[in-house]
Image (cartoon, helix red, strand yellow):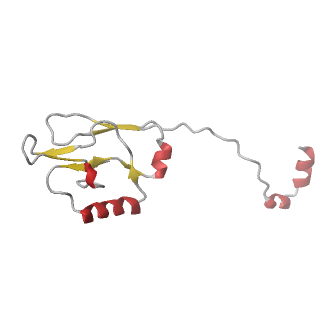
């Protein structure tokens, strides 16, 4: 989670000079090869800006939350959102992690062949 200083596709940038496609591909390849994926967040998606109020104004989605499947399973109820901070060129992200409560399932009985080697195995089974 944080400022990755890169975008995943051209729709994540508004402003002058398109982002080089080779950088976008490299960032996406790195994310995918790491087994990560975007965790969506609410609020403004353009988390960084430069030159506000000028013809060179740029907005980009540079900040994001990346998760793997294990994290998503563990924190299935988590939420995230961007926050407005008027004194910064970045919007911070707030991640609320709520662990998913797991129901404990009863394990099925499994017979172990090694038990047959116990001296009193037959007596124990007959008594049960």
Left or right: residue 10 versus residue 86 is: right
**Quadrant of residue 8 in the image?**
bottom left
Left or right: residue 56 versus residue 14 is: left
User: Residue 59 versus residue 111: which sits nearer the camera?
Assistant: 59
Left or right: residue 125 versus residue 55 is: right
Classify the position of the C terminus by image quarter: top right
Residue 44 visible, this angle:
yes
- At x 84%, y 61%, the residue is 117
- At x 43%, y 58%, the residue is 35
- Location of residue 36 in the rendering, given as x and y in whole percent from the top left corner: 40, 55
- At x 21%, y 58%, the residue is 19
- Location of residue 114 in the rendering, given as x and y in whole percent from the top left corner: 79, 61
Across the whole image, how many numbered discs are drawn on residues? 0
- At x 14%, y 53%, the residue is 16
**Which residue reaches farthest left?**
54
Question: Up-down: is 29 above or below 89?
Answer: below
- Location of residue 49 in the rendering, given as x and y in whole percent from the top left corner: 16, 44
Left or right: residue 68 versus residue 85 is: right
- Location of residue 55 in the rendering, given as x and y in whole percent from the top left corner: 7, 46
**Quadrant of residue 97 in the image?**
top left
Residue 96 visible, this angle:
no
């Amino acid at each position: 989670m944080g400022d990755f200083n890169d975008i995943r596709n051209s729709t994540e940038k508004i402003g002058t000079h398109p982002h080089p496609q080779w950088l976008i591909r490299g960032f996406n390849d790195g994310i995918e090869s790491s087994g990560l994926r975007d965790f969506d967040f609410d609020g403004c998606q353009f988390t960084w800006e430069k030159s506000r109020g000028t013809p060179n104004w740029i907005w980009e989605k540079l900040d994001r939350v990346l998760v793997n499947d294990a994290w998503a399973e563990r924190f299935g109820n988590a939420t995230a959102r961007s926050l407005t901070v008027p004194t910064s060129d970045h919007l911070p992200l707030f991640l609320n992690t709520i662990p998913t409560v797991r129901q404990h399932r009863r394990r099925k009985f499994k017979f172990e062949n090694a038990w047959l080697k116990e001296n009193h195995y037959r007596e124990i089974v007959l008594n049960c």
